[in-house]
Amino acid sequence: MTQLTRLRDEMRQRGLDALWVSRPANVRYLTGFTSPADGKVLVTQDRATLYTDARYTVQAAEESALPQFIARPPATYEHASADVGRGVVGFEADHLTVAGLEELEAAWPDATLKAAPGLVEELRSCKDDREIEAIRAAQALADRVYAEVRPMIRAGVREADIALEIEQRLRRAGATNAFDVIVASGPRGAMPHGTASDRVMQDGELVTIDMGACLNGYNSDMTRTVAIGTPTDEMRRVYGAVLEAEEAAVQAVKPGARAADLDALARGILERHGLAEAFAHSLGHGVGLMVHEAPGLRGTSEDVLKPGMLVTIEPGAYLPGVGGVRIEDLVLVTEDGYEVLSQAVKETV
């Protein structure tokens, strides 16, 4: 079943005659167009059109099998109005601005506009074989670059220099950073999103490296925490607790598993180690065209894992003024269990 066929089935279930797609990742997913921030898609039950402007005339024709209309608003809306008519038109309320919605209302006065958030995102949550291989390749590249850079993580080196090495090596391989590289050493390890700073790493510290590759539009994501020299007994204890929680949650990944239950499993292990308050974020998230996408692995999630989902498992413990630990794997939900795509070594601390 093609992406558009699945989408049209979902549209019928929601009572939509058409869907106006504006979120860039969703535009790319439906069209293959690699400049999706400058594109929109109108999907009806018998037609789908990519809208972009004259800067992309050649590119859109080369990349997308969908018919294209090359213009800017208001010509874009005028062209689409023939397909919109008096129908019920869904829009991505979690992306479209208020001004953008007002433009649609003015352009299509006879249509009924209806918020339809998460419709394409739900389809994207389960990857097909092509997408899985793209993410597998991105993760393999990230593993390789991490292995090349790992010997450089030593006392006397700046966090920023490690991040720069990672970025340069990814770019030389034809990729980019999936997100700003996190290099958080010593007390900065207590910052879950501690992007690399000018801090010089010291002997006896733990260093958290969170990195991913974006290759051909698809992302990877993984985290490793490593030691420079011999860390304190307390930080070694924390590392062991996080590793235990991470490995237990990975082993519990399978079709039918509730995301909230996985979060609770990891959180319970950390609680037994006296680190419940130190785990300051959810267990993980989906990965694909975006680094953070459905499903969400958090305590309030109603998501259930399905084959083809790519999720992170990334418990952490953060002690303000002392340091922190996070360990993250990228995991594919298979038909009967799981496959860990991130193969970078988890070191003994």
Image: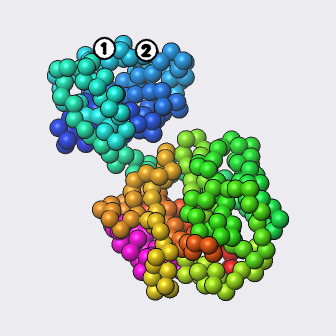
* Mark 2 in CB contact with mark 1 (< 8 angstroms): no
Examine the image and state in which quarter residue 146 appears: bottom right
Examine the image and state in which quarter residue 222 appears: bottom right
- The total of numbered circles placed on residues is 2
Residue 259 within the segment the image draws in magenta: yes
In the rendered view, would you say 287 is above or below 101? below
The magenta-colored residue range is 244-268
Q: Residue at x 52, y 67 (%)?
A: 314
Quadrant (top left/top right/bottom left/bottom right) for the C terminus: bottom right
Q: Residue at x 46, y 65 (%)?
A: 281
- Nearest the eye: 176 or 277: 277
Please state if 10 lies on the left or on the right of 180 as rendered.
left
In the rendered view, would you say 183 is above or below 289? below
Magenta residues: mostly which secondary structure?
Answer: helix
- Nearest the eye: 21 or 257: 21
Q: Amino acid at mark 2?
A: Ala
Q: Which element carries disc 1, helix, strand or loop?
A: helix
The crowding category of the residue bearing disc 1, from other C-alpha atoms within 10 Å (few below 14, some 14 to 19, many at least 20), is: few
Residue 78: give its label.
1
Q: Is residue 281 visible?
A: yes
Residue 302, position in %: x, y? 30, 62
